[in-house]
Image: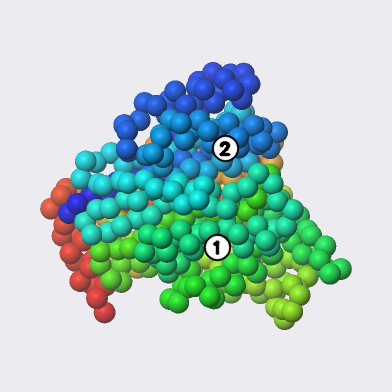
C-alpha cells in the first residue's frame, strides 16, 4: 500500500455442490464473482488429468469472459484436488491504496501491484500448452516467454523472487541418444542454462518444482522491484544442504549430451523481502542434509517437513535484526500429496499444526520418487499499527544499506 506494507490474502474456493466437473466449476465461478472487482491478482485452478482437456478449453474462455480486460494472472494445473473435481486458490489484496493493473503477453495474463515505490509482477501459466512430447523444448519455450514478459515491463530475471515450475510426469524418463534422462533433470539442465545467461546476481529465487499429470512445462512467477536496495534476502535451512549443492548421487538419470555433471536444482529454501514483510517458502519436503527422511511414511514426512518450515521461519527472523520482535504468520500453505491413500492423515496433521491458515491439498508427483509430501507457503510479518510499519520499513532499509 502507498506508504504502508501490503497484506496479500489467499482464499481456497471449493465447490459447494457435488456432481460432474461442469456443475462444480459453475459453483466455483459463482463464488469467484463475489470478490471485489480489481482485488484479485492471482488464480490457480486445480483439476484431475481426466478433466484436463475440457478444463484447458472451457475454463480459459470463462475466466477471460468473467474478467474481460482486467484478467488477473491465472493457470490451470493437473493436480487433482482430493475429493473434488476442481478447486481454486485465489490471491487477493483489498486496499484502496494499492494499485493493481492487468495486462497480457501473448496468451499469458499478468498482474502488476504497486505500493510505496515497490512494484510486483505476478504471472501464471507461462508457456502452458495442452500437450508436450519434449520436456526440454517445452521448458525452453516457458523460459523464453518468461524472460520476454519480464522485459516488457522493465524487469529482468534478477527480480524474480518466487518461481513455480510445473513439470509433466516429473519422475518419468525420456530416451535420448540411448541415454535415460529424467524429466526433472532435463528441466534442471534448461533452468541452469537460462539462469547462467540471464541472472547476474548471487542466489536464486525461492521455488517449487512439482509434477503435473498433463500439459506442457509451465512457470508462475512473482518478480519484485523493491523501493529500497538490499531488501531481498536468501534464507537457508540449517538442517538442509542448499539444493544447488546437491551431490551427483542424489540426481537421477544419465548425463545430458555434452555435459560432464548433472545440474542440481537452483533455488533457495526461502526468500525474505523486507519491503513487503514477506517470507516466500519454497516447496519443502522431508530432506535433511540431502537425503530423504521417513521412507514410505507420509505422516513422518509431513511432520519433518513442518519442522523444517519452522526452522526456516526462525532462520528468517535472524536474517535482519529488525524482525525479531514481530510475529510471522502463514498467509497460505499448499500441500502436495503423492498418494491418494495418504490424503486423510496428511490433512489431519496439517490442519492441526497450521490452524487458521488457508490450506490447499492437491495430488502431485514430487521431485523424488521416495518423497510423499511437499509443502510450500507464504508468510508475512505482523508488524502492527501504521506507525510501527513505517518505523519497520525505515529501520530495515537503513540496516540493509551496507
At 65% from the left and 57% from the top, the residue drawn is 138
At 21% from the left and 41% from the top, the residue drawn is 96
| Residue 84 appearing in the image | yes
Which residue in the structure is indicated by mark 1? 144
| Residue 316 appearing in the image | no
Q: Considering the image in quadrants, where does the C terminus appear? A: bottom left
Residue 78 sits above or below residue 2 on the image: above
145 relative position to 172: left or right: left
Seen from the viewer's position, the closer of residues 96 and 13 is: 96
202 relative position to 209: left or right: left
Q: Secondary structure at mark 1?
A: helix
Q: Marks 1 and 2, Cα distance to the nearest angstrom?
A: 25 Å
Residue 255 sits above or below residue 98 on the image: below
Q: Position of residue 243 (x, y in %)?
A: 57, 68
Which residue in the structure is indicated by mark 2? 46
21 relative position to 236: left or right: right
56 relative position to 309: left or right: right
Amino acid at each position: 500500500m502507498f506508504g504502508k506494507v501490503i497484506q496479500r490474502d489467499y482464499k481456497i474456493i471449493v465447490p459447494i455442490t457435488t456432481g460432474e466437473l461442469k456443475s462444480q466449476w459453475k459453483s466455483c465461478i459463482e463464488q469467484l464473482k463475489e470478490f471485489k472487482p480489481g482485488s484479485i491478482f492471482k488464480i490457480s485452478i486445480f483439476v484431475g488429468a481426466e478433466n484436463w482437456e475440457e478444463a484447458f478449453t472451457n475454463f480459459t474462455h470463462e475466466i477471460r469472459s468473467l474478467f474481460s480486460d482486467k484478467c488477473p494472472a491465472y493457470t490451470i494445473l493437473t493436480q487433482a484436488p482430493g475429493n473434488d473435481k476442481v478447486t481454486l486458490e485465489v490471491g487477493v489484496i483489498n486496499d484502496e491504496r494499492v494499485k493493481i493493473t492487468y495486462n497480457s503477453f501473448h496468451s499469458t495474463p499478468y498482474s502488476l501491484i504497486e505500493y510505496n515505490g515497490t512494484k510486483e509482477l505476478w504471472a501464471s501459466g507461462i508457456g502452458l500448452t495442452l500437450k508436450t512430447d519434449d520436456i526440454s523444448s517445452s521448458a525452453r519455450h516457458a523460459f523464453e516467454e518468461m524472460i520476454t514478459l519480464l522485459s516488457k515491463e522493465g524487469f529482468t530475471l534478477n527480480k524474480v523472487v518466487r518461481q513455480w515450475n510445473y513439470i509433466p510426469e516429473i519422475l518419468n524418463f525420456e530416451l535420448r541418444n540411448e541415454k535415460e534422462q529424467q524429466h526433472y533433470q532435463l528441466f534442471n539442465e534448461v533452468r541452469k542454462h537460462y539462469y547462467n545467461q540471464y541472472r547476474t546476481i548471487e542466489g536464486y529465487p525461492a521455488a517449487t518444482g512439482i509434477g503435473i499429470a498433463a500439459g506442457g512445462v509451465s512457470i508462475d512467477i512473482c518478480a519484485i522491484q523493491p523501493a529500497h536496495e538490499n531488501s531481498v534476502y536468501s534464507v537457508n535451512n540449517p538442517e538442509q544442504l542448499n539444493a544447488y549443492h546437491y551431490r551427483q548421487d542424489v540426481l537421477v538419470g544419465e548425463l545430458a549430451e555434452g555435459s560432464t555433471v548433472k545440474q542440481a536444482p537452483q533455488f533457495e529454501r526461502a526468500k525474505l523481502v523486507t519491503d513487503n514483510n514477506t517470507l516466500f517458502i519454497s516447496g519443502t519436503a522431508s530432506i535433511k542434509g540431502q537425503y530423504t527422511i521417513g521412507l514410505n511414511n507420509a505422516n513422518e514426512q509431513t511432520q519433518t517437513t513442518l519442522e523444517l518450515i519452522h526452522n526456516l521461519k526462525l532462520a528468517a527472523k535472524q536474517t535482519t535484526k529488525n524482525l525479531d520482535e514481530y510475529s510471522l504468520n502463514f498467509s497460505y500453505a499448499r500441500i502436495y500429496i503423492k498418494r491418494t491413500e495418504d490424503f486423510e492423515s496428511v490433512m489431519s496433521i496439517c490442519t492441526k499444526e497450521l490452524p487458521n491458515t488457508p490450506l490447499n491439498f492437491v495430488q502431485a508427483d514430487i521431485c523424488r520418487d521416495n518423497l510423499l509430501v511437499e509443502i510450500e507457503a507464504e508468510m508475512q510479518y505482523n508488524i502492527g499499527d501504521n506507525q510501527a510499519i513505517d518505523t519497520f520499513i525505515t529501520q530495515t532499509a537503513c540496516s540493509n544499506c551496507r
